[in-house]
Amino acid sequence: MLMIRSLLTAVAASALLVGAAQAQDVKIAEALRDKALTDRLAWDITEDLTTNIGPRLVGSPGMERAKDWGVARFKALGFTNIKVDQFAKPSWTRGEESAELVAPYPMKLSIVGLGRTIPTPAEGVEAEVALFTTYAEMVAAPASAIKGKIVVITQPMVRAQDGAGYGVAGISRRAGPVEAAKRGAVALLIRSVSTSSSTVPHTGVTTNGADVVTIPAAALGVPEAEQLERLAKKGPLRIKLKLASSLDAGDVAWNISADIKGSEKPDEVIVIGGHLDSWDVGTGAFDDAAGIAITTAAAKLIGELPKHPKRTIRVVMWGSEESGGSSDAFLAANKSNLEKLVLAGESDTGADRIYSLQLPRGSEGHPAMKAAIRTLSPLKIYFDRNPAAHGGADIGGIEGAGVPVVNLNQDASRYFDYHHTADDTLDKVDPIQLAQNVAAWTSFIYLVADSDIDFRALSAAAPAQAGH
Amino acid sequence: MLMIRSLLTAVAASALLVGAAQAQDVKIAEALRDKALTDRLAWDITEDLTTNIGPRLVGSPGMERAKDWGVARFKALGFTNIKVDQFAKPSWTRGEESAELVAPYPMKLSIVGLGRTIPTPAEGVEAEVALFTTYAEMVAAPASAIKGKIVVITQPMVRAQDGAGYGVAGISRRAGPVEAAKRGAVALLIRSVSTSSSTVPHTGVTTNGADVVTIPAAALGVPEAEQLERLAKKGPLRIKLKLASSLDAGDVAWNISADIKGSEKPDEVIVIGGHLDSWDVGTGAFDDAAGIAITTAAAKLIGELPKHPKRTIRVVMWGSEESGGSSDAFLAANKSNLEKLVLAGESDTGADRIYSLQLPRGSEGHPAMKAAIRTLSPLKIYFDRNPAAHGGADIGGIEGAGVPVVNLNQDASRYFDYHHTADDTLDKVDPIQLAQNVAAWTSFIYLVADSDIDFRALSAAAPAQAGH
Ligand SMILES: [Zn+2]
Ligand SMILES: [Zn+2]
């Protein structure tokens, strides 16, 4: 009760601070929101990047063209302080891949190598299958059941609005190769980390940790995984797998950033963005051309105002999200001015509608955030009292370094149908929902940028359980 | 008016014939219907055929195993008069296939060779693209726009409950290769004849006519077709295509049939079935393990009655629907007793619910058909007054030879998402809807088999426009 009373008191006090400037800001935020709903820029950016650049794997010519595209786009849209921060990033390139069921009968399998997998020998690997329906079952199995075999893990992924199924099922991909190798497996095939029922397999990086993957690892289409599961109940299976790939240890990637410069406190910076790199399969429309488009279009709309908001808005096109590294590179490049970063946010869950807002702890009573919550409400975005936590790999590192973050949570119900597949293409993007995203980002970010809100101070002052 | 009055008189007269035997038949048909709704056999057959046999392309070892499976299944289920009618059927076998966009930038394309396409040279064909958004546009183009190019046709397919979009869009596949070749194209790529937005491409036979396809022809995934359409607006495209395949002119296929023998007029035969062959991609669950399962399970349920109905029910597992030939072979083998075929019906549009019934012209007033219409009504199947026409390639030939046909029309809304693709797999089959199919077939066929209805006579007596 004490905590609740003190919170209410703080809220009431804040409410009194709402003045004329604040009312004007709300008006502008509402106008930005409504304009964004019919603005075409985010669609144009998504269409352009996916169509004219195409796939953008780190280390590929496509990514290099994407870098030039990003700089040109920022210029054409009137952003200033355009920077290309190059950093070292070993790259991995896929070669020919194939797999087939050999016994009990021959059948082609739809597979895709996991990012950073090692190749098989040129002639492939063929072995009996040790099939497990969950990752936990594989870890619990005696090595004798695995040694010399191709491990198949068929753990399914649960569809959820907040994408919660991804972390659970993703363990097969993240830890599976290393753990299967420890037990003597000659290769690993996982059911794609997917909510779809498509044979189109889902790639994704194997591990970002210190562990090195020492066996070839690939993902299977969902129906094939289910077929193997049924067949394994009836007798032994054999699979032949061929994976080719190459590594370039000396490669580079780039974080590209540009500003809508603040009119009064330009050194106070709000960082938003998406990632420019994508997997080599598909054209990375949901992941993450849409995030690039949403945040760039939101900043551009704010930049068109007769007067820029007080603080600077910086859009970062992160250069290596899928393979990791963007975040560390940004931190290294911005070590000295991290305390000037007011807030960070990332759009990286596709292009479907935003359904909730999560704020840095303790900030929801501030007039600017009360205004934000009200401004987002007509977009059917509710305020989730759980404090924001990093929503993507890129800003996770910044958050770890103490920068407050915001989450504008996108509906992930469809996201993992297409994520990391050849089916992540423009046709999946719904322009109406895309525009709702821009409307939310532009109005929210404007309110932060034109306010004096100090998220760090509010968070430090907030009772530990506030917001829960 | 005269016609309507004479029809009504005939209906009234027929109604008077409904006697005790008819009432008993309705009771049995209703009991069969209700039993089928909870019967597992059709699911078991679909699961078994797709899992333990897998893909079943004509000429493949899978199809040979399927033939043995069919015979064994019929035996185990107590069918009699099991026959394997072998016929000559040249077979086509797919080899390695790939395609990539070469300019304006390199991108892998998801393709599948059309059935019976010729191969490319081993090194592939690479050429500039002549892109047309409809088949008609390609046909209307001057040869100079096509000569030496790879023709791409991106005509989309419309989703429709009755599958009507298939015939319209399918022209690209059926006639496209021959017409593009006539104009000097070096290869043809069509947008998959598909209602989905998946990159999984849809195969299917190029042409069944006398024309010979002389250029390599393949289908593209839908997002790739749309990507090429967008790119073609901005500049020239180049594509490289590799297709390998082989032909065996001396191969064979088999129609397999078996009976539930009639108790009083065993020489009067009702022919039902599905096709056992499938494409080599996927496991042919919708197309057409489900049709095999539905009709076999329906006949088996009738066979379990204490007394078989008067007439014989013959289930045919057609052996070459996808590449054609089953129907001709059946006609050749049954030339002498075609007039004994009372009615023919085929289940070949997947496993989703039946929504309408179409009868041979002039038969709807017969007491057995009135009973059938009433019996199907609780399954949410309406009577469509348009007379039945053949619903599949296999019974089309029989119908042409004067055998009356019935249509139990399945909802095709989802069918062309998966048809002829690697995604035509067991997980797409909904057991509840599958059981509804069995319930319809078993009750309908029982009513025909235990009646004296003479569809030929009713059709001959019916005014030309009756039923419309
Ligand atoms: Zn992403
Ligand atoms: Zn079929």
Image (cartoon, coloured by chain):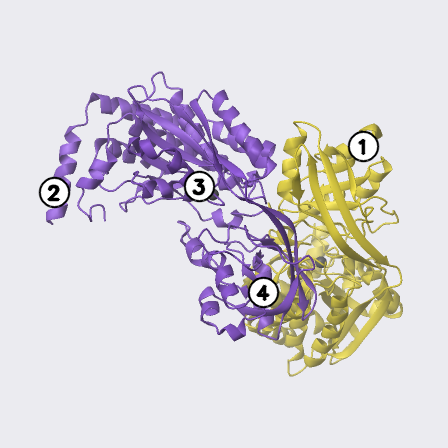
Chain colours: A purple, B yellow
What residue is rendered at 76% in x and 57% in y? B322
Q: CA distance from mark 3 to mark 1?
A: 43 Å
Q: Residues within 10 Å of mark 4 (few under 14, many from 20)?
A: many
Q: Secondary structure at mark 4?
A: loop
Question: Badge 2 sits on which subunit?
Answer: A
To which residue does mark 4 refer? Answer: A186
**Amino acid found under the numbered disc labelled 4:** Val
Residue A187: where, in percent of width, then height?
Answer: 58, 62
Classify residue B233 as left or right of residue A213. Answer: right
Q: CA distance from mark 2 to mark 4?
A: 60 Å
Classify residue B134 as left or right of residue A306. Answer: right
Q: CA distance from mark 2 to mark 1?
A: 77 Å
Q: CA distance from mark 2 to mark 3?
A: 36 Å
Precedes in sequence: disc 2 or disc 4: 2
What residue is rendered at 16% in x and 28% in y? A17
Q: CA distance from mark 1 to mark 4?
A: 50 Å
Question: Badge 4 sits on which subunit?
Answer: A
**Amino acid found under the numbered disc labelled 1:** Ile
